[in-house]
Image: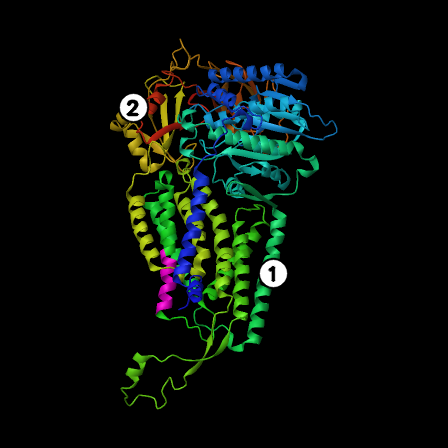
Amino acid sequence: MNLRLKFKSMFNFATAPVTFLTLVTYISILTSVVVIHEVPITPPKKPAKQLGLDLDQAWRDLQAITRYPHPYNSHPNDVVRDYILHRVNGIAKKHSDSGIVVADDLTSNGTYAAGQIIYFEGNNILVKIDGKDKNASGGVLFSAHFDSVSTAPGATDNGMSVATLLNLVEYFAKNTPKRTVVFNINNGEEDWLNGAHAFLEHPWAKLSTVFLNLEGAGSAGRPLLFRTSSTGVTKAFKSARHPHGTVLSADAFKARLVRSGTDFTVYETAGLKGLDLAFYRKRSRYHTKYDTVAGLGGQSSLWAMMEASLESGKALIDMDDNQKDGGEAVYFDLFGETLVVMSLTLTFIINIILLAVGPLSIGGLAALIFFKKRDHFWTSNGWFRFPIALIVSGGLTTGYARLMAKANPYIVYSSSYSVLISFFSLFFITLCASIRTAENYKPTKLELQAPQRSIILLETFVLYWILLVLDTASYIGSSKLGGLYMITFFYAGSLVAVWLSMIEMYFGESKKEKKPVDRQQEEVESLATERTPLIPENANSFTRVIRDSKWTTLFWGLEFLLSAAFPLIISSQLVLLLLTALGETLADGNSAKLVYVGTSIFTMFLILPLAPYIHKIQKSVIYILALVLIGTTLYNFLAFPFSPASPLKVYFQQTLDLDAAVDGAANNVTIAGVPEFMGHILSSLPSAEDAIRHDGVSCSWAGAKEGLRSCSFKGPVPHLVPGIQDMKPKSSKLLIFDAKRLTANSGTITIKGENTRSCRIYMDVPVTSVRVTGGNDRLQESYPIPQDGLKEIRLWSRTWDRAFEVHLGWEGKVKAEPVRGTVACEWAELGEGKIPALDEVISFLPTWAVASKMADGLVEGRRRFEM
């Protein structure tokens, strides 16, 4: 073989070149995607490179804000609020000539219905900086809540966001924006988004038409563009230097796979268009004691939020108000360096065009090939191998996922990459083996038909066409899901690859050649019998052979890059995001089967583009992946799923029946968690272990956390108010109330809790009207009480020890019929000795588990009433 032929053979569609290109492509792309996904952005150390921001000051702010858990209903919350107010007043004084105004909002109250009737007295801190363009219409709202949950200091949720806003306040005070900007540093988000609702009652709420909401739904990592309101505002996020986002996360919210709410919902319902930027990694540490500054591992996450907020915020400010719409968006980032944004309508139109152009163009090319070379028409040999192989390999992979979800359902919690690698290996091995087995059983001959590569290219095109039809149909319904945008790219790449394959076929040589003599067959035929044909089979020594085109060496590589490489970039980013975002939601009650089977299906899309070339990959790759599959399977099925780095969350609440005797069923501690580990969790707690020995533990599926098991037992008595015997029956000063029946269908309840600013009323009959003395006489627009009423009223005061006077109305009662219910107050302040039951949980839980709050209050005291 001469040198030219040797060089050409290195690029032929043969085992060695295909294996080499596959390995190089997959290793380079997957390594890049994983590194970008895992390695944080390096923050600039020199102030000159910090875009006019001050990272060190932001870090000091974060440390001050997150010293202690500071929920709305706690005294540390007041300390944090005082610090933030001091900081913004200091900035306003320093830049007094910039038009900056600070509002200490202690007047905005809101009443609204959102599953419950909520009355909330806000104490948000607002800042307004007038824009230099007096003709510009509509301002920009920047929002973040400063309260944490009762069980976490809140470094990620939501300290980094608040520290970012404080930096942005100073930035725009020094650099006057084009349009007016308003900052809502709000309080009470963790308790049903109350701070955002209170803001809607302030006059400044009408100044803005677009917004940027900063949030934390995980712990550390890079902030993700969770949701957007429109294509117009989404384009503003393209200005971020390291954009990270995909519309799939918005679809996850619509499907309730992510059980978190943010202020984004309130602002969007009020008619504003905006962006929801939030942390999402390490959800197992979210709302726990591990959400600390030390747990961030440095300043990278803080800088990522600051950088993205500044650049996207400036883009919103510079945007004309008429550019904020454009319909729902389809968006995704590429390697964290650029953001692709299209409207859902445009994506729909592109899909329709592709769905029509694809079959028509392929049909036209097939006709040209047929009329030019009638003997070059596809025959039945080699067809349907890919669909059969896909059914076999897909069934085995999803079956394997279902088995894992049953055998060790929480292993994905701490070992997501091991789960992903096992799905990848199994699907690759079974798909490759299925196609190879079919080839060995009935080899694909080149005579009078297309090569195997071209056949599978066409079959994958048909598969993507069907998937694109389903994807496009989802744009039409009320859900309007755009997260399967990758199908469009799979389809487009496959279509162009099929075009190239058919062009290659069109120019391929077709001529008669002498058929090589098979010496072994010749020897067999020499042993003639009575069945030996008179005319030997190879008597006609010429046959029609379809040779490769001179373009084959170039075309197959281009086909590979179009149909495999680019789709791999899109799908690999989606798989990692899906696994990272949902893997640790199982402790929230999400379905393990949904997480595993969904991940396995998305993993298949990493391999599917390789199908036309997979039969040319060396067997050694299969053997290596088989060993990997064995190792990961043993680990996935046998390893313990939790660790201190990825702890299992269990949920705590204590309830006090203040009408019962001290030694009766007055004091219940409830622990909720995944059912498989509740026995281990309870046996680790001294109080629960003692209750188990005396049959004093009751468990049920009913509770605040859907999909979790709740177990209750008698626990240590809390000490919520100094000098008060908390459990003294009926005469307890912990909760005082008065319930009066006014008419057949109305009444007034006055309720006051000691050392709290949160109380509740649970009615036995639905309430259709509510008014709190001192509050608004109206319900917020878009939040009416349903016609059939609601049974729960939640009350929040900005001051301590407030007496709530609540006027209630209901329907369908006569005065002779009593109206009954329960009044309650909440306590959410964690401190040494205040809630011994929670102290016990924190101290005695295994190292692989961690406590989080079950409801707004860590402790709820209750009393029954009758009117």
Tally of numbered discs: 2
- Name the mark on residue 794: none
Q: Amino acid at mark 2?
A: Ser
| Magenta residues, start to end | 429-440
User: Along the line of sight, which residue is nearer the eye, 515 or 582?
Assistant: 515
Q: Which residue is mark 1?
A: 356
Q: Which residue is mark 2?
A: 687
Kindly give the residue lying farthest to the left in the view shown: 693
Say if residue 137 shows up in the picture.
yes
**Left or right of residue 538, residue 569 in this image:** right
Residue 509, placed above or below residue 616: below
Q: Badge 1, how many Cα within 10 Å: few under 14, some, many 20+? A: few
Q: Is residue 39 magenta?
A: no
Residue 113, placed above or below residue 363: above
Q: Secondary structure at mark 2?
A: helix
Q: Is residue 435 magenta?
A: yes
Say if residue 790 shows up in the picture.
no
Q: Position of residue 492 (x, y in %)?
A: 55, 56
Question: For the N terminus, which image quadrant?
Answer: bottom left
- For marks 2 and 1, the one nearer the N-term is 1
User: Along the line of sight, which residue is nearer the eye, 490 or 691?
Assistant: 490
Residue 69, placed above or below residue 447: above
Q: Secondary structure at mark 1?
A: helix
Kindly give the residue lying farthest to the front in the view shown: 3
Residue 637, placed above or below residue 619: above
User: Along the line of sight, which residue is nearer the eye, 210 or 62?
Assistant: 62
**Left or right of residue 50, residue 624 in this image:** left
